[in-house]
């Protein structure tokens, strides 16, 4: 991305390859973002647009164009062509970099005089590569400064240093947002030195608190349902984090606010304040990455793991905040055995989502520069996932990806939670071993839920000490809670006449009539029904009630 939100210090931007010069005093500029999905938006291009308006010496016509990686290069090129720009800026990330050479080639054939400018981490950290693959200019540094400076150079003006704040949230931004996920940056940089991260040991700067709160308020009333803070470690300054959380809690809004935090930096004031949040108002993403001390030391990551675990357990127990925990497989010094220990330890925290990611060796990261020395072999193409290391073989990583497939389509989507708990207790498998077994027996590739459930049932039934009646009852309860009984697989249905008694109990308890599929009879003789009007805002599950018949 182009780095966004104005820095307090004068820009220290580099400009690579200023060979193509245009002395028009006013130019048509298109800023292109290629997002992963339509529901995502790009803050970066809007910040650059605001920077051009605020800082460029000449007045330019600036248009923002947002596309997705699911569109073809031909379709995106046609949309760019329709705007007839003189200058095109493209925001580059690992998810869109692979399609850019083809896109640039198509643009060159349609607009031979187009000036193509790349910014963002993929380009800024690998400038010569992109200059060799069709870019006229590559920018690094804060894009709200550097793009305006480039335009000044192209028009024959002398760029100047700028200190004023810019606000990317223009009326045009909100028109384009149209309810999609919104992003905000209230701090830039990170005080920590994690060697796999591009932000490691970068200068930590803050947007003035009053401006940050004003922007949050604007976004909260924009019609979006989710606002994500892209601050690398949001609570690096605990008091400032509390000030913003207090502001978020004070807003009359139904938005969900997502923050990336360090769990061991959550102090008592932070935890007490978060405990007051309305259910579903706040999501916390917590990067633990590894529990293996030699690994954490190898990547220069300092974490008080015991305190982090304690704080995560407290957050989960409060029941009002969605907690997301991240682990990275393939880091130095981490074997499959030590990773499994860490995964099982993380699973025991009962976070609502446990992300199992594979290490990506990003351009510009310290770890990528050490890759050859450490014996880390990675893919040449984005997203540069590790293939093998001295500690993890290619087979080990493939084994983990099989487990990740099952984890992603069950636990991380709040699916089959009761069943997983029962099967783990009965089989005595470790969580990671169970997920790997699930991934092998029932690989999920756009599988219909009913078919997936049948595949999982067959696998679970094959495990030692798993009783068929108990397994069916747990899976039936999960289906009621997950789907309100809709699309219940045939093998879970029970047509016993006592089901009518369960419906009668449910109607009396809920003081309304419920659908027949919202009640069922368990094989242990009890009845169960779901309250389809009381979805949990954290898990998105519906509560169950049991009836003794």
Image: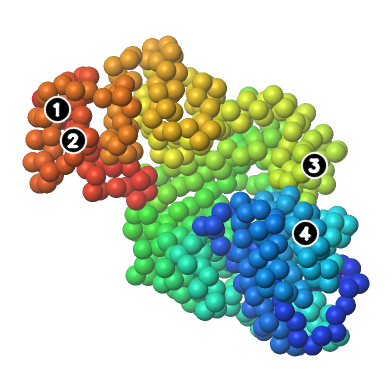
Which badge, 3 or 1, comes first in the chain's sequence?
3
Task: Provide the secondary structure element on which disc 3 rests.
Answer: loop
Q: Nearer the viewer, residue 151 or 278?
A: 151
Residue 308 left/right relative to 500: right
Which badge, 1 or 2, comes first in the chain's sequence?
1
Residue 499: mark in rendering: 1
Task: Provide the secondary structure element on which disc 4 rests.
Answer: helix
| Mark 3, residue position | 380
Label 3 crowd bin: few (<14), some (14–19), many (20+), radius 10 Å: few
Image quadrant containing the N terminus:
bottom right
Question: How far is disc 2 from disc 4 in space, using C-alphas?
Answer: 57 Å
Q: Is 75 placed above or below 479 here?
A: below
Question: How far is disc 3 from disc 1 in space, using C-alphas?
Answer: 59 Å
Q: Residue 162 appears at what percent x and percent y? A: 73, 83
Label 2 crowd bin: few (<14), some (14–19), many (20+), radius 10 Å: few
Q: Quadrant of residue 544?
A: top left
Q: Are marks 2 and 4 in contact (CB under 8 Å)?
A: no
Q: Residue 369 appears at what percent x and percent y? A: 83, 47
Q: Nearer the viewer, residue 164 or 334?
A: 164
Q: Are marks 4 and 3 in contact (CB under 8 Å)?
A: no
Q: Quadrant of residue 186?
A: bottom right
| Mark 4, residue position | 106
Residue 321 left/right relative to 497: right
Q: Residue 194 appears at what percent x and percent y? A: 69, 49
Task: Provide the secondary structure element on which disc 2 rests.
Answer: helix
Q: Given this view, does label 4 or label 1 mark the residue nearer the observer?
A: 4
- Residue found at x 78% / y 28%: 390
Question: How far is disc 4 from disc 1 in space, using C-alphas?
Answer: 63 Å
């Amino acid at each position: 991305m182009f780095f966004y939100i104005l820095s307090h210090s004068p820009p220290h931007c580099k400009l690579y390859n200023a060979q193509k010069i245009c002395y028009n005093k006013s130019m048509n500029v298109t800023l292109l973002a290629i997002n992963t999905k339509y529901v995502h938006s790009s803050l970066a291009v809007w910040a650059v647009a605001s920077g051009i308006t605020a800082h460029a010496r000449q007045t330019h016509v600036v248009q923002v164009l947002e596309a997705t990686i699911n569109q073809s290069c031909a379709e995106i090129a046609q949309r760019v062509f329709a705007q007839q720009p003189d200058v095109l800026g493209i925001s580059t990330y690992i998810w869109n970099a692979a399609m850019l050479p083809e896109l640039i080639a198509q643009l060159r054939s349609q607009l031979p005089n187009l000036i193509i400018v790349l910014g963002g981490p993929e380009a800024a950290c690998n400038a010569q590569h992109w200059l060799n693959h069709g870019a006229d200019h590559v920018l690094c540094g804060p894009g709200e400064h550097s793009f305006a400076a480039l335009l000044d150079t192209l028009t024959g003006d002398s760029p100047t240093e700028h200190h004023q704040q810019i606000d990317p949230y223009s009326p045009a931004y909100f028109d384009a947002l149209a309810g999609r996920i919104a992003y905000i940056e209230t701090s830039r940089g990170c005080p920590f030195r994690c060697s796999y991260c591009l932000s490691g040991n970068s200068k930590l700067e803050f947007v003035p608190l009053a401006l940050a709160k004003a922007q949050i308020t604007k976004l909260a009333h924009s019609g979006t349902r989710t606002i994500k803070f892209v601050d690398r470690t949001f609570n690096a300054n605990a008091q400032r984090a509390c000030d913003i959380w207090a502001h978020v809690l004070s807003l009359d809004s139904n938005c969900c606010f997502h923050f990336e935090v360090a769990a061991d930096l959550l102090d008592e004031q932070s935890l007490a304040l978060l405990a007051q949040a309305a259910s579903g108002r706040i999501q916390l993403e917590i990067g633990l990455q590894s529990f293996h001390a030699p690994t954490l030391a190898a990547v220069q990551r300092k974490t008080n793991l015991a305190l982090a675990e304690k704080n995560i357990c407290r957050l989960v127990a409060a029941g009002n905040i969605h907690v997301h925990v991240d682990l990275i497989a393939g880091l130095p010094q981490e074997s499959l055995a030590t990773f499994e220990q860490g995964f099982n330890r993380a699973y025991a925290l009962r976070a609502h989502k446990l992300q199992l990611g594979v290490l990506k060796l990003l351009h510009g990261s310290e770890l990528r520069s050490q890759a050859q020395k450490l014996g880390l072999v990675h893919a040449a193409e984005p997203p540069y996932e590790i293939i093998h290391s001295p500690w993890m073989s290619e087979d080990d990583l493939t084994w983990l990806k099989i487990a990740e497939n099952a984890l992603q389509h069950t636990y991380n989507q709040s699916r089959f939670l009761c069943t997983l708990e029962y099967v783990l207790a009965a089989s005595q498998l470790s969580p990671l071993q169970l997920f790997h077994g699930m991934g092998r027996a029932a690989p999920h590739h756009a599988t219909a839920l009913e078919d997936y459930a049948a595949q999982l049932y067959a696998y679970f039934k094959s495990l030692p000490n798993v009783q068929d009646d108990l397994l069916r009852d747990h899976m039936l309860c999960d289906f009621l809670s997950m789907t309100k009984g809709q699309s219940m697989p045939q093998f879970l249905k029970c047509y016993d006449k006592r089901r009518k008694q369960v419906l009668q109990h449910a109607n009396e308890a809920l003081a309304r009539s419920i659908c027949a599929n919202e009640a069922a009879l368990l094989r242990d003789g009890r009845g169960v029904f779901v309250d389809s009007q009381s979805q949990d805002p954290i898990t998105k599950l519906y509560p169950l009630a049991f009836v003794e018949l």
